[in-house]
């Protein structure tokens, strides 16, 4: 028997209370009200939606804030296949409306809604600080984004630039849909195992057994995505699912060739590449420490 009981794993798999689950909806509603009340932004086509662990239903109680995407649809960034240009896809001339202007406008709308003291502009987002009536929300202004294929079709995502001029591309809708599909294919065990591993990491940090902040919530969810469905479905207990997952992750991250084509949950971006905060070595080390911590 390992260090953590089956009963504990079974408790770790559970989502937070219903009260916790209302936080995303409440935050999204307040952000929407702020945007609609702004004289500039209310005239634009903007989509406002949750992303991250709350939206994907993999959050645990220690996930202290919600992520809200504010995506401008009137303008889009794009990437074209090699050798192609704007004219090949009948794209209009570039807009002179800058992303930085949009982020400034979103910040101004939030200040008008919540007050200057409640708003903190960060490198990649604008934080609406929490209080007794609301949870903290990280608002991420983005532009719509099209990644074109040679035949002229495209996949839609989001793109933005941080204040230090680094580009970030995400595909939150595809992430959400793929997560739902895997959860269905694994009898709802996918999202439950994500929560188990998040709580395992937090427990290890609490006990002083782990200190690497490169192992993020997003990374844990992506690692679980790359675990075969058979590990979720063919093991009869959470203890065995955790153990089998660690064995699989260890073997798959020993060598670059075994995991170099692993994707995020969206399957539109590679999980391991030079621009990432984490490396396969970070993951392999986390797996070894977890296995030893659990005394398997």
Image (cartoon, rainbow, N blue to C red):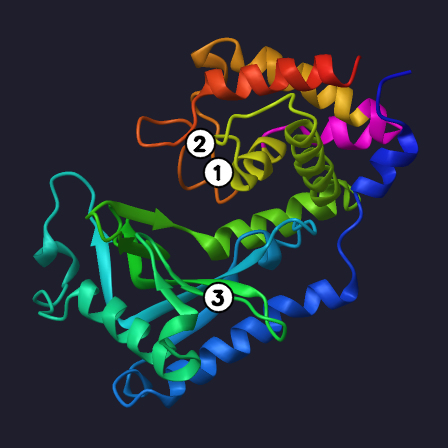
- Which region of the structure is painted magenta? 226-240
Marks 1,2: beta carbons within 8 A: yes
Mark 3 — residue? 129
Secondary structure type for disc 2 = loop
Mark 2 — residue? 271
Secondary structure type for disc 1 = loop
Q: Is residue 103 left or right of residue 9?
A: left
Residue drawn at the location 62% of the way across and 75% of the way down: 133
Q: Nearer the viewer, mark 1 or mark 3?
A: 3
Secondary structure type for disc 3 = loop
Q: Relative to residue 198, is residue 128 depicted above or below?
A: below
User: Which quadrant of the rendered structure holds the N terminus?
Assistant: top right
Q: Nearer the viewer, residue 195 or 138?
A: 138
Asked if one can make out residue 153 in the rendered structure from this viewpoint, the answer is no
Mark 3 and mark 2: span between their CA atoms? 30 Å
How many residues crowd mark 1 within 10 Å: few (<14), some (14–19), many (20+)?
Answer: many
Question: Residue 194: within the magenta?
Answer: no
Q: Nearer the viewer, mark 3 or mark 2?
A: 3
User: Which quadrant of the rendered structure holds the C terminus?
Assistant: top right
Q: Is residue 222 left or right of residue 76?
A: right
Q: Nearer the viewer, residue 197 or 265?
A: 197
Q: Relative to residue 31, is residue 247 depicted above or below?
A: above
Residue drawn at the location 28% of the way across and 90% of the way down: 39
Q: Earlier in the sequence, mark 1 or mark 2?
A: 1
Q: Is residue 182 left or right of residue 1?
A: left
Residue drawn at the location 26% of the way across and 51% of the way down: 162
């Amino acid at each position: 028997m390992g260090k953590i009981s089956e009963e504990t794993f079974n408790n770790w798999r559970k989502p937070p209370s219903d009260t916790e689950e209302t936080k995303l909806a409440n935050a999204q509603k307040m952000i929407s009200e702020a945007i609609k009340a702004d004289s500039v932004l209310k005239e634009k086509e903007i989509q406002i939606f949750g992303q991250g662990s709350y939206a994907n239903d993999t959050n645990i109680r220690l996930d202290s804030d919600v992520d809200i995407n504010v995506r401008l649809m009137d303008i889009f960034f794009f990437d074209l296949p090699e050798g192609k240009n704007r004219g090949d896809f009948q794209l209009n001339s570039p807009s002179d409306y800058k992303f930085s202007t949009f982020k400034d406008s979103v910040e101004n709308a939030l200040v008008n809604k919540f007050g200057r003291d409640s708003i903190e502009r960060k490198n990649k987002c604008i934080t609406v600080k929490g209080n007794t009536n609301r949870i903290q929300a990280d608002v991420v202004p983005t532009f719509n984004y099209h990644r074109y294929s040679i035949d002229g079709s495209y996949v839609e995502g989001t793109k933005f630039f941080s204040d230090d001029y680094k580009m970030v591309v995400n595909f939150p809708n595809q992430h959400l849909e793929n997560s739902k599909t895997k959860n269905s294919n694994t009898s709802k065990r996918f999202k439950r195992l994500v929560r188990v591993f998040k709580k395992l990491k937090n427990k290890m940090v609490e006990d002083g057994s782990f200190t690497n902040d490169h192992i993020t919530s997003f990374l844990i969810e992506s690692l679980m995505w790359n675990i075969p469905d058979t590990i979720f479905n063919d093991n009869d207990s959470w203890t065995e699912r955790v153990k089998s997952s660690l064995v699989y992750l260890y073997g798959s991250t020993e060598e670059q060739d075994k995991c170099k084509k692993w994707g995020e949950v969206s399957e539109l971006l590679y999980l391991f590449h030079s621009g990432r905060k984490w490396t396969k070595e970070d993951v392999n080390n986390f797996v070894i420490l977890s296995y030893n911590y659990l005394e398997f």
